[in-house]
Structures are given as C-alpha cells and as structure tokens.
Amino acid sequence: MAKQTQSELPVAIVGGGFSGTLLATNLLRHGVNVVLVERDEAQLAKGLAFGTRRPEHLLNVRASNMSAFPDDLGHFLRWMGFSADDQANRFVPRLAYGHYLRELLIDALGAAPGRAEIRQADAVAARVAGKVVTLSLADGQEIDCRALVLALGNFPPVSLPALASLPTGIHLADAWMPGALDDLGDIEHVVLLGSGLTAADAIISLDSCGYKGRITALSRRGLKPRSHADVGPVAKPVSEPESRGSWLVRAVRQRAQASSWREAVDELRPHTQNLWRRHDTAAQRRFLRHLRPYWDVHRHRLAPTVAARLDALEQEGRLAFRAGKLCGSDIEGGSVRLRWRPRGTDAEESFTAQRVISCIGPEGDVTRAGHRLLDNLLAQGLARPDAHRLGLDVEQSCSLRNAAGEPQANLFAVGPLTKGEAWEIVAVPDIRRQVWDLARYLSSAHWVGGEGL
C-alpha cells in the first residue's frame, strides 16, 4: 500500500460524543479524512448527555437553539418536524437529540465513502514526529494522523473523602452509574450530594420510577437551577460590556433590576467567552470562588416543566434543598448517617439515608481523571492542565499548550476540556461554533469565502 501523503492523512478524533461527532461531521463536509475513536459503542454519536434512555430527561436549551450547525439554525427544528412558530420553545427529550446526532454522523459517513473510519477502541498514547502524530490503541494498533483532537467530554466525579468507607450499594459515586434507580421499594430517604442540573435529573428520574420517599439535595449553598421562561429568549443584542470584575457584577445586577434577571444574563451570552478571556487569572479565580454557583443556576436553567415538577415535590414535602458542608459518614445497619454542618453555623447535624448519590458534577482536573491517553500526553509534556484545573490548557484556536506553555501545531482539544480557556463551553450553541471553527481551520476553509483573503 502506498504511503499516504500529509494531506491524505486523517484527523484522528478521540471521543465520539457530541463534540467529537460534530467535529467529524464538519470535517467530512470539508473533504478531510477522519478516524473517530470511541471506546464505548453505546456512546457513539450521543455521549453521556444525549445517551440517556429516560424520556423525562429534557434538553436544557430550547429546540430553536439546538441546531448542530451555526450556519443553519433551523436544522434541528426541521429534523424534528417542528415549525418555527409554534414549537420553537419546546424542550425535547435528550434521547431524541441523541438520535439526531447519530443520524448526522451516518449521513456524513454515507456522503464520504472511503474517507472516514470509526474505531471502537481505547486510545492510550500518542507520539509526535514532525507533522505526523501516531495514536496508539490498547489493542496494539497505531493510527498515523496529521492532527489529533481530544473530544473526551466530561469525566466522572471523584468520590468524596467523607464517603470513602461507604459500600457501593449505599453510595453511588456517579449519578449516571447503573443501579442508581434500582431496588427503591424499601428506601425511605435518598440524599443527593449537589443541587445542580445532574441532581435535577436524578430527582425527576426518582419520581418517574415511582419512588415515594424523601429526597434531600445537599450542597454548599443549597442553590437550585432557575427555570427558563415559557417563551423566549427575549434579550436583544447589546454591545460588549466595558465593565470588569466587581463593576461588571454590579452592572449586571442593575440591568436585572431594570428588566429581568433572565434578560440580563442572556444579553451576556454573545460576550461571555471574551469577558472571561479579558480577566486575568487572579480575577477568574475570584469569580470561580465567589460567583460561579450563582452564575451556574441563573445561566444553566431547567426546562419549565422540570422546574414545575421540582417545585411540586418541594410543596409536597418530599424534596428539600439543604445548604451546608458534608463532614463525614457512618454505617448504621443498612443505612448511613451523614454528618453535615449547615451553612452559616458551627454546629454539626446529621440525618439517616438508605442511598447516597453523588451529583457534584464532573471532575475537571485532568491529572485525576485516570484517562490513559491524557496521562501519556501529560507525562511527555505535550499537554498540561489549565490554571484553574477545569481541563486542559489550550489556545483560543483549541491547540494544546505543552508543559512550557507553547501551542502544539497538531494537538487539539474541544468541548468541556477547554473550559479553562473559554469558560462557557458546555452547551450545544457554544460547542457547535467551536468545532465549526476548528473544522474550517483544519481543512483550510478559513482562507476562503472572503474571511482569510
């Protein structure tokens, strides 16, 4: 077989969830050869978020803003058979969106015979020699590529030290683990650690499974995600705010008082990434320490029907949100006694539960993720964590920075791994633009259409 030229070498994408699928689709549309490596066949073209089989798990973004392509914002609406007038405000099941992504990939593969390959394998190492990256798989095979893109999505949360001694049957370290909703008949009290979107999913699923006991969601501040408005968004385009730091916070609060908090937050959407980048590391760290939880619950909202179900469960006395710090745990027969300190006090309290489910969100520190390919790149100095340990250190172009802070010409990352650089890079509207831009760069399409020349 003739040796492939540099231009014929594929782009290798590790991770076949939303980010990887969409990048592969865009690259194929631009004529680039692609190898998509995904170790879990069930997650291919869906990922964790859209791989759920539970119909009660709804998208947290309106159907009108869920197109996979920034140049065709009505694409998903047409795929669903929705009209822009009467269905744009629907929040559809995430499993439906998973089918949408898989169909996009299948169509892209069909339109590019011989230019795409899907490998069900575990990528474990990579080496760089000039303009060629060689990706090693766990089965011993190797893939030569002209660029390697990490699209690994979110990593499972690391178990909390206070729960380290609990047996698996009582404590589930990840809300998405199999068995989280099994054998609920004799359980009187379920404790969720965390109160964000993952906890909301768990609460809705517990209720849908017929669980009639009590649910407590414990987090440091006891905050729960706000609801989307029934119709929207209504925010009009505004110029990027000139304020920074605490002055920006003050300006947003004033805007919220003058209009609404939803409008004040939505007005920032086109500017959020640039605002993040224009603050130095110290200012970003202050935001993460003091404001991140409040930003998250106002920015990442619930579908109105989901928010209404949570409110109803609270009114019935079956659901409670508690603010405090988990201090420890002790086994008592078939239950666990959780010791915690309510926020604003020094006194320790406790309650007993039969199941504890961690909903604390994904692990961002790549040095703790336990991913063999990441560990290999870090050990070689070809990659490094970002300053806040939210993911990998990358350029705005998605190029990985090595241990010395230098951008790599043929190593990239997309999606949640780039959160330290972009901050807002977990929702579909943000990721679709990121992978669109990277596909254009890797195919040199950014030099046509009047944008480069």
Image (tube, rainbow, N blue to C red):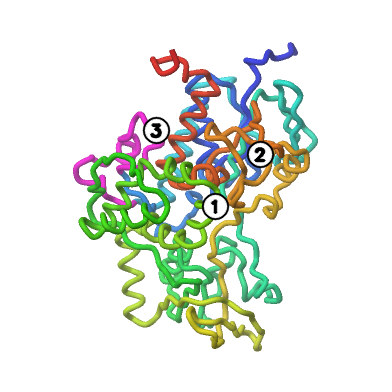
Within the magenta stretch, is there residue 124? no
What's the residue at 40%, 41% (across, down)? Answer: 429
Which image quarter: residue 316?
A: bottom left
Q: Percent position (x, y) of residue 232?
A: 24, 50
Which residue in the structure is indicated by mark 2? 120
Earlier residue among tags 1 and 3: 3
Which residue in the structure is indicated by mark 3? 69
Earlier residue among tags 3 and 2: 3
Q: Tag 1's secondary structure?
A: helix
Q: Is residue 9 visible?
A: yes
What's the residue at 44%, 72% (across, down)? Answer: 222
Q: CA distance from mark 1 to mark 2?
A: 41 Å
Whether tag 1 and tag 3 are in contact, CB under 8 A, the answer is no
Which residue in the structure is indicated by mark 1? 282
Q: Tag 3's secondary structure?
A: loop
Q: Nearer the viewer, residue 41 or 151?
A: 151
Horizontal side, residue 125 vs residue 226: left or right? right
What's the residue at 50%, 74% (across, down)? Answer: 218
Three-letter amino acid code at disc 2?
Gln
Three-letter amino acid code at disc 3?
Phe
